[in-house]
Amino acid sequence: MCFGLILLKSTIFGKKLEEKEPTMKAINTTLICLFCCSMLSYGQNIQDIINQVDIARLTQTLSEFTGEQTTTVDGNTVTILNRQQANNGLAGDYLVEQFEALDNITITDQSFNTNGRNIIATQLGKTNPNNIYIVCAHYDTVDDYCADDNASGTAAVLEIARILSKQCLDNTIVYALWDEEEIGLRGSAFYANQAAANGDNILGVLNMDMMGYDGDDPGQPGDNQFDIDYRNIAGSEAMKDDIVAVLNTYTFDLSVVEVNPGTTASDHASFWFAGTFPDDAFSAVLVGESWETNDETPFYHTSGDRLATLDIPYYHEMVKLVTGYMVTKANLVAVDNTVTQSMTMLTSNQSSASYQWYDCDTDMPISGETNQSFTPSSNGNYAVEVISGACTERSECLSFNTLGLDAFSEDEINVFPNPVKSNLNIDATLGVQDLNIKLYDLSGKLVLNTVSSEALTTLNVKDLPQGIYFLNVSSSDKTGTYKIVKE
């Protein structure tokens, strides 16, 4: 965020961008088939999409993009320590590769001056491709690290893109990462002026800048407050109201502070002042930590702005909120890419579609496996691609490891407490030994994995987000899957 800079209206135009219920009993085979739960990939309602925001992924991206840990770019092990505008080519390449790993998007690597480089990914809407919503952040810095300003916004854009690119949407989303914000909002101003000149139908721009710091003690007044900066320009107030409606409709540990007139010191302002005429302006807001209540990072614009200074649970809530807003405005198309797993079969929950099952270990389609249900011939990781009308969605990869195994009886394995807050116990009451224990979240992602030869095994799940999980316990000849509710 570049406080103190004055945004001047640009008159430079360019050509249009090229779009390149809880139970302690085991769910046996019969119950799985009847209950229709087991491992699910992305759900088809907004709360389920919100719950896909992964705190571990966010933390890893922050760590990589701030140089706290190495990463891989163009096949080489690198450290992205500094992202100042004249020294951030490596950071730009990293962002391109992150977007390239996603489906259903077109990437524009947009140079706008000698050094300036915006990285933009576009996911076209299936019904209304000209209705455009932008979620954005700047990725350049003024010093080393700069986790809050603005790796926090950048990582959020990448995580939202990872989740929504798996979904079929009515409207278009542009995931934009701006360069040269710190020296005058140059990247976003270039894009906004082009969009105004082209008459692009941009219906909302949600800018994220510095959204990871919260200095208030948990449970104390002011904890988890955040700002929405807006002005009475081009429907921005209505956009703010829509974000607050999402906040009040779904489950977030956040408290909003509405700021009007909002600051002009970040990239949303480029859209307020786009083009040459007042009618050229676009609806835009800034979402970030609460500068309005003086609860901003004390390490602003210094190399002390490190990952360790951020409130990661607060940041997680912020990203969830923005995800909820974006999926609401983009409007999910009714394609179900969830999968039901029994002990012998995987079944797509979308009927009346075309299907292709994939081996996730090779990322290759499985020859001949084009039915709604798939019976694996070996244990492994599998996904299904669902084609329904103009929409193609692929499920998350599901771990299938129950072939040839009988189910544990209810008196062999006891899992408690359920619901659980901190410690989950697995009691092998009849002395079953050498257990493989795996905990999956609702998307099918493996979140805990251990092997135990103890009669009583305890898993620490305190730091896991609230929600539904599935615990798979297996020995050499038996297996059991248990639905777990984390409070």
Image (spheres, grey):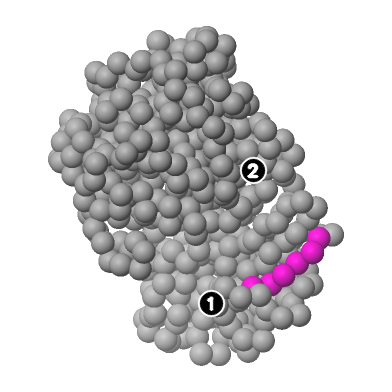
Q: CA distance from mark 1 to mark 2?
A: 29 Å
Q: Camera-side residue: 180 or 234? A: 180
Task: Point out the stretch of residues depicted in magenta.
Answer: 353-358
The amino acid on which the numbered mark 2 sits, given as a three-letter code, is Leu
The amino acid on which the numbered mark 1 sits, given as a three-letter code, is Asp
Q: Which mark is residue 361?
A: 1
- Please name the residue shown 59% across and 26% down the image: 198
Q: Position of residue 134 (x, y in %)?
A: 53, 33
Residue 392 is drawn in which quadrant? Answer: bottom right
Q: Is residue 141 visible?
A: yes
Outermost right residue: 352
Q: Nearer the viewer, mark 1 or mark 2?
A: 2
Categorize mark 2 by other alpha carbons within 10 Å: few (<14), some (14-19), many (20+): many
User: Which image quarter holds the N terminus?
Assistant: top left
Residue 119 is drawn in which quadrant? Answer: top left
Q: Position of residue 94 (x, y in %)?
A: 36, 54
